[in-house]
Amino acid sequence: MIALPDIIISVAYILGIVLLGLWAGRRQQGGSASQYFLAGRSLKWPSIGLALFATNISTVHLVSLAQSGFDTGLLNGDFEWMAAFTLILLALFFAPFYIRSGVATLPDFLEKRYDRASRDWLTVISVVSAIIIHIAFSMLAGGIVLKTLFGFNMYVSVIIISLVTAVYTILGGLKAVVITESIQTVVLVTGAVIITVSAWHRMGGWHPMVQVLRDSGGLERLSMMRPAGDASAMPWYSVLLGYPVLGIWYWCADQTIVQRVLGARDENHARVGPLFCGFIKILPVFIFVMPGLFAYTLARSGRLDLSGMSNSKGIYTLMITQLLPTGLVGILVAALLSGLMSQVSGALNSISTMVSYDIYRRYRPQTPDARLILTGKIAGGAALVVSLCLLPLLNRYESIFNGLNEIIAHIAPPITCVFVVGVFWRRASPASSRLTLWIGSGLGALVFAVNKIWPETFLGRVPFMMMAFYLFCACLVMQVFFSFVYPCERVVPIRRLYWNSLSEPLSWKGWKGIGNYKFLSLVLLVAVILLFYLFR
């Protein structure tokens, strides 16, 4: 339980965010559908970068990355730094197409590149994944935190916070989401830095932590590139082969994430915004994963009491209550709530956009903007209810982060395939896209089901990262095969929707100076490679 001043800080923060969101939403009242769903395509790169980060970093990351740091060390930090590579791909190769084609959703882009069937399938998959991955898992992590800190019923507390978030999200649209997410990012990072500094101070610094690891035979916890056969089931080659499959879907082809880029003012902002996010993504290893590792060494040295913890899911909230004084606890709770609220708000907005543009408007193309916006608001509310119903099922996962990525590993491969092949190969045909999406999604669902029902089979022993890679390879073979069997018949209309060469997207000059997207991409690439080398 936490003290009254901390409760007051937490409640004041929630009220402040709601009022800010309602103020931003009120400015959008009476506006067009483009203003509601895409902020009138007026977003600048700082807002895009901060909103991308806030939508990505939810309470799931705060809670589960600390849990992974406690359980396995820095290993799951791979997901954070590998994200920089896919954000570079988004900035260089995907964002220009999205902006130039003027699409409102990524399913809309697939229709322009392939056909209507591809659009419909991606819409269904995107809505389902947003409900499960972006909303339900975030609610679960948030519920665990609120139960641990306040003693509240997990489901009741999550329902209240989610409904509060839905109010300003559904009323205000993307503008309200981006404005509140920008504030929430600052609060979230500030809170994470506080807990990291507190753990560092309690441990006495880096060298005492390393000494505890050495004495306990756990120095491998500092490594992010594990050898083959490692007990973590995530060796270095699975990261290099499997993460791009997950990452390209998540960062380049998932509506919940990319919607911030679709609302960019122009191509410069659409390119630089993701790169800005890429630089911010360097931080989570140090402020989200590292505290869990400090908690492990603090517990090993007797400076952190684990007696009240039933499993490692509660390690982050345990650190909050034992390492921080009154006042700072309230700030950390605000940071955790930021993660939950930003993730839920971003996902609800993307679901509203896809249901309105990709489903409702398809059957009623002359729908006025006011009706389109109303449809989106109803869809957002319905998605929230469905997400709440999934919480008991998802709570069965021992590790929230691993459960999340296991689901993504079976969803992402066909979507990543059709986007990558479609953007880089002109002969990718509409028939190949829809068949790859249908068969690939069915194959992923089948493998997932087999693993759950018969976990001791050969498939059940394949690490999820490698499974993602194998499924992607199968989808790649399928799409190339079907492209030759059912060749593309409409090359001219899609000419602007694929690159003729890898150098073509780099021919665009962009801004001059250090703000140039090519310079920023190079700096980010070198920085992340050096970091991986240091923590190899």
Image: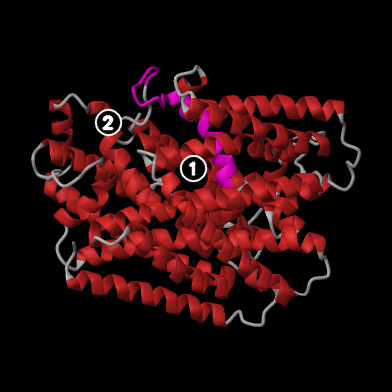
Examine the rendering and report whether any part of residue 511 can be seen. no
The amino acid sitting under disc 2 is Arg
- Tag 2: Cα neighbours inside 10 Å, few (<14), some, or many (≥20)? some
Front-most of residues 442 and 94? 442
- Residue wearing tag 1: 83
- Tag 1: Cα neighbours inside 10 Å, few (<14), some, or many (≥20)? many
For residue 392: magenta? Answer: no
Task: Look at the picture and state if 168 lies above or below 496.
Answer: below
**What is the secondary structure assignment of the residue under circle 2?**
helix
- Residue wearing tag 2: 221
Q: Which residue is drawn at 54% across and 31% down?
A: 448
Residue 337 numbered tag: none
Residue 153: x and y, percent? 31, 60
Q: Over which residues does the magenta segment extend?
A: 227-251
Left or right position of 215 against 499: left
**What is the secondary structure assignment of the residue under circle 1?**
helix
Q: In which quarter of the image is the C terminus?
A: top left
Q: Quadrant of the N terminus?
A: bottom left
